[in-house]
């Protein structure tokens, strides 16, 4: 389906369930594009989640692809006011990643704004009218460039969110010297001396061992875990853009991070470590160190350690590795009925009191580096 946006500019938006053939070329024209904008990511997510469809929005001017946006449409399993309801979500992000529009950087500023606004408007039009919700998370770079423009689109509610990013300038030796604080270097050295090993692998069996730890941590966090087949499929990315940092002790996996690499950035996306070894072998520290080493080996300029939600100790932990907080933009658009239900949910939660969640590691029964966003 093609929807004209502005006849004078010859810009039109096409809505499809398939990626356009010239999508890769568009990604090469936007330095802010991320792994989560790739076709492989979209196909993998939609192929491993039930009742999920891909949504591809493409902006063309005189037939030329100048912008696009990927999203997933699915039915949420979450309860609202304690009741299981069939809320249909359309999200241009997934499990703490960022998404949003891709815009060709070789356009002039006014054209970029027009393409961006057109894509956001087209995403809003995909919001189911009864029990529906749309959302997107803009990366720090995209938020800085287009956040002001989002402020002129009143239908979207904005929430602040942050991610922790480590600059890898100078390579691993410089990073170790300038970014890694002394106590983390000591933890790394003690963990290795006591027999732990950290390495990068694409071994699906090791990822399967890790999943047992992650599954238990998800129970503590009160979330639905990302399905194991989805993680396994990502690790099979034929272009080598996904790697698993594994920490093992005496043949047993005690932690890991699944990392996504695209362009100049590596995202340490899905990760957790076994609390049993948190104070003896420091697997969380070893995971982050392993991520750094491999990201530098690949020539990446940044390692994105993701968000920390409201868990202050996790945010502080990342700062020990030289991470600096960067502002992302979370934008949500709800149908009227969904908005009313969310207000009822918030009031219900207010009467019950706020339930504070911590790191699994902090509770004495959990992990040192679980990803929460």
Image (cartoon, rainbow, N blue to C red):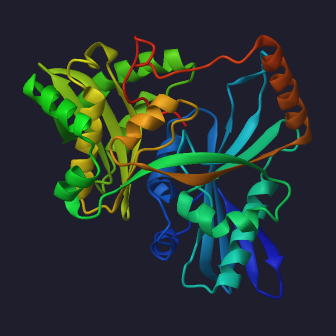
Q: Left or right? Give the position of 34 relative to 255.
A: right
Residue at the spot x=62%, y=19% of the render? 356
The outermost residue toward the front is 182
Q: How many marks?
A: 0
Res. 275 visible in picture: yes
Q: Image quadrant of residue 279?
A: top left
Image position of 216 with respect to 92: above or below: above
Q: Left or right? Give the position of 325 relative to 297.
A: right
Q: Image quadrant of residue 53?
A: top right
Residue at the spot x=90%, y=32% of the render? 340
The foreground one among 300 and 12 is 300
x, y percent for residue 269: 42, 41
Image position of 101 with respect to 105: above or below: above
Image position of 155 with respect to 67: above or below: above
x, y percent for residue 277: 25, 17
The foreground one among 189 and 220 is 189
């Amino acid at each position: 389906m093609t929807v004209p946006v502005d006849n004078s500019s010859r810009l039109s938006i096409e809505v499809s369930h398939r990626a356009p053939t010239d999508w890769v070329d568009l990604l090469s024209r936007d330095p802010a594009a991320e792994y989560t904008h790739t076709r492989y990511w979209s196909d993998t997510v939609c192929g491993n989640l039930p009742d999920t469809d891909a949504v591809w929005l493409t902006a063309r001017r005189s037939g030329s692809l100048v912008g696009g946006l990927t999203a997933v449409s699915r039915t949420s399993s979450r309860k609202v006011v304690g009741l299981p309801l069939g809320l249909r979500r359309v999200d241009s992000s997934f499990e703490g990643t960022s998404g949003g529009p891709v815009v060709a950087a070789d356009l002039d500023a006014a054209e970029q704004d027009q393409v961006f606004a057109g894509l956001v408007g087209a995403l809003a039009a995909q919001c189911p009218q009864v029990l529906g919700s749309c959302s997107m998370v803009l990366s720090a770079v995209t938020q800085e460039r287009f956040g002001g423009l989002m402020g002129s689109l009143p239908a979207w509610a904005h929430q602040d969110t942050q991610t922790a990013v480590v600059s890898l300038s100078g390579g691993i030796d410089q990073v170790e010297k300038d970014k890694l604080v002394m106590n983390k270097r000591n933890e790394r050295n003690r963990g290795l001396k006591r027999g732990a090993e950290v390495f990068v692998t694409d071994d699906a069996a090791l990822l399967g061992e890790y999943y047992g730890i992650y599954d238990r941590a998800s129970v503590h966090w009160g979330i639905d875990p990302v399905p194991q087949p989805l993680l396994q499929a990502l690790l099979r990315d034929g272009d080598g853009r996904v790697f698993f940092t594994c920490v093992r002790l005496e043949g047993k996996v005690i932690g890991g991070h699944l990392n996504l690499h695209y362009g100049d950035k590596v995202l340490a996306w899905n990760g957790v470590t076994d609390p049993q070894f948190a104070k003896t072998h420091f697997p969380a520290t070893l995971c982050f160190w392993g991520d750094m080493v491999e990201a530098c080996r690949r020539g990446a300029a940044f390692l994105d350690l993701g968000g920390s939600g409201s868990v202050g100790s996790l945010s502080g932990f990342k700062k020990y590795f030289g991470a600096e907080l960067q502002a992302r933009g979370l934008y949500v658009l709800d149908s009227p009925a969904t908005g009313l239900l969310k207000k009822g949910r918030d009031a219900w939660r207010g009467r019950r009191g706020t339930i504070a969640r911590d790191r699994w590691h902090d509770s004495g029964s959990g992990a040192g580096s679980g990803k929460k966003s």
